[in-house]
Image (cartoon, rainbow, N blue to C red):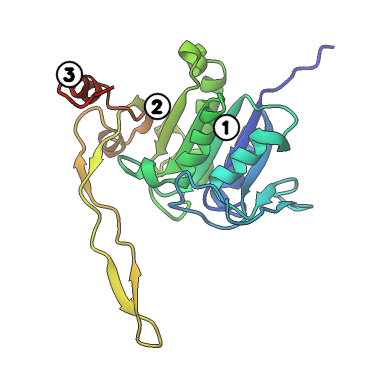
Amino acid sequence: MTEVIKPHVLVSNDDGYLAPGLLALVNSLRPVAQVTVIAPEQNHSGASNSLTLSRPLSIHRVAGGERDGFIFINGTPTDCVHIAMTGFLDHRPDLVVSGINQGENMGEDVLYSGTVAAAVEGVMFGVPGIAFSQIDRGWARIEDAAAIARDIVVQMLFDSLAQGEGIATLLNVNIPNRNYEDLKRWRVTRLGNRHHSQPVVVQKNPRGELIYWIGAAGEAKDASTGTDFCAIADGCVSITPMQLDLTHHARLAAMRTSGWDRS
């Protein structure tokens, strides 16, 4: 009998290797993929695409329990995927999956998100990536979110668009906290837009010195039809294809013809 070779999926996150969202995601993927887990030791929400360059990193493997075999690193989500891709893994994975994050990553959130950053790092090495986030914090219906994440992963693994035009696909997925049947409504979206963040929170520490907390994210500014905000408001799973090219091509052409290009 011919052995069926499962696709290899690298799973990471930014909430840390002990996060319920990571465990639920891994358990849902194991029937359909060979799963390797390399996640941060601590929570790194908001870490974006940061690499740890000021100190060496340590790698540890969990032995026993429901997270048996999980690998964790005392670094960022990007560190985890970068190390995996540059020598730790013997073979490059077929897909990098990040999450399931506790809380939404919509609009400008993707620029700060460690969850998205882990998927981005895979794409930078030519491997398709998916970042999964659950809208409401607290892990309610996380098993349902993990089940729908598995369906999206299967779709990605067998979709020719995953490597369209030689460029690895990057998807940002936001999942409402609903039951599995309700989550079968998927909508392909663009990123919406938020108002500016709320003001910094100023407090005093026990010694009377001022300390500052970053304020909460702003409310939706552009939640029009077609955006991730609109899809979530309608109870749908939002799937946003993204790219890494930050060049403003229209502005580039205009600047070349208006005296900026003096080469």
Q: Earlier in the sequence, mark 2 or mark 1?
A: 1
Closer-to-camera residue (241/55): 55
The residue positioned 38% from the left and 27% from the top of the image is 245
Assign the C terminus to one quadrant of the image: top left
CA–CA distance between discs 2 and 1?
Answer: 15 Å
Residue at the extreme front of the image, as rendered: 263
Q: Are marks 2 and 1 in contact (CB under 8 Å)?
A: no
Instruction: Kindly give the residue lying farthest to the left in the view shown.
Output: 258
Instruction: First in sequence, mark 3 or 1: give its number.
Output: 1
- Image marks 3 and 1: residues in contact by CB distance under 8 Å: no
List x then y, in percent, for residue 136: 38, 50
Q: Which label sits on residue 257?
A: 3
User: Helix or strand or loop: what does disc 1 sit on?
Assistant: strand
Neighbour class for label 1 at 10 Å: few (<14), some, many (≥20)? many
For residue 202, above or below residue 82: below
Image position, residue 55 (x, y; %): 62, 56
Where does label 1 land, which residue?
Answer: 96
